[in-house]
Amino acid sequence: MLDFLTDFPSLGRADLSALRRTIDGNFREFTRAYGEAIEGFFNPLLKFLVWFEDVLLATPWPIVILVLSVLAWAGSRSWKITVGTAIAFFVIGFFGMWEDTMSTLAIISVATFVCIAIGIPIGILMARYDRAQSIITPILDVMQTIPSFVYLIPVVMMLGIGKVPGLLAVCIYALPPLVRLTNLGIRLVDAEVMEAATSFGASSREKLFGVQIPLALPNIFAGVNQTIMMALSMVVIASMIGVQGLGVPVLRAISNQYLALGVMNGLAIVALAIIFDRVSQTYGKRLQAHRSGDAQ
């Protein structure tokens, strides 16, 4: 028995080593066979990201600040948040971080739109089918708990270094909260409301888009808020695989022990996070109040 226990680890290591070599070899063959096709699939997304970043960089800073302030006002209806947004971006430009901030703003905005386009339909699917929820929930658990450096490996192996791998890494990390909260929001819709819609002869599509999604919007926007926050938390890690933005000088500061450079760019990331958080939270609260008023 003791001999068996002594030999077992060595046998296990040999089998595991062979399994690793098999997985590595198969994945290399997969990337060689389909790498170009995968890059071609993501090429439109890359073009849009580059175009959007170029627009932000080419637009004069007063116009960008004005547009961002208008968007902050439209979302929050708060002069404090609007003025704070304008001041924050002015200070960012004054300290020479404008270009990096615009690059970060571009990738975070595109990542958020991608997560919305993918996450809300998946959340709806989970809410409508319990089997889909049982299958997707473990995947979301893995996406949220696995270290980001782990899934960077296959992404970089398939697509190399650049904007698209960084964007995919951000989306993988930031997607789960939106999916979960969309699912939760739809499931929390009152059963009596659904019965009333059914009694009026509403179809499944009409109940989904006319009742469930509108009532679930506060939860959905809470998911959008969390997605934005998690996307911003990936800025520094994404800079390690070639994504330009505020993460690059932070990474440079870590490598060279530049305290001032790291703190300034870190505070710029914090400013973006606070602006996005306040605007999206305030909009969600206004939406909740509006829905409550309609219900009354």
Image (tube, rainbow, N blue to C red):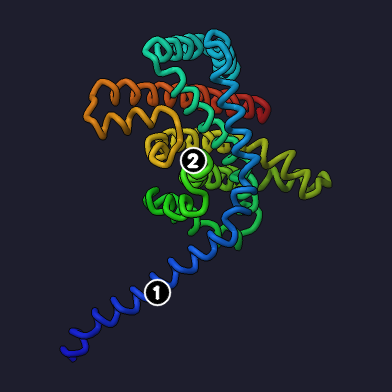
* Screen quadrant of the N terminus: bottom left
Dividing the picture into quarters, in which one does residue 262 lie? Answer: top left
Write the residue at 81% across / 48% down.
203
Question: Are circles 1 and 2 on residues that touch, CB within 8 Å?
Answer: no
Say whether residue 254 is left or right of residue 40: left
Residue 6 seen: yes
Write the residue at 52% across / 32% down.
107
Say whether residue 122 is left or right of residue 165: right
Picture coordinates of residue 84, whole percent (x, y): 45, 12
Q: Residue furthest left?
A: 2
Q: Nearer the viewer, mark 1 or mark 2?
A: 2
Residue that badge 2 annotates: 162
* Screen quadrant of the C terminus: top right
Residue 141 seen: no
What amino acid is labelled 1 in the image?
A: Leu
Picture coordinates of residue 287, whole percent (x, y): 60, 26
Q: Residue furthest right?
A: 201
Nearer the N terminus, badge 1 or badge 2?
1
Write the residue at 64% across / 48% down.
41
What amino acid is labelled 2 in the image?
A: Gly
Dividing the picture into quarters, in which one does residue 59 lie? Answer: top right
Residue 69's tag is: none
Picture coordinates of residue 153, whole percent (x, y): 42, 53
Foreground residue among 265 and 21: 21
What secondary structure is marked by label 1? Answer: helix
Picture coordinates of residue 224, whole percent (x, y): 54, 35
What is the CA distance from the residue labelled 1 to the residue labelled 2?
A: 30 Å
Dot 2: within a 10 Å radius of its alpha carbon, few (fewer than 14), some, or many (20 or more) residues?
some
Residue that badge 1 annotates: 19
Dot 1: within a 10 Å radius of its alpha carbon, few (fewer than 14), some, or many (20 or more) residues?
few
Say whether residue 255 is left or right of residue 270: left
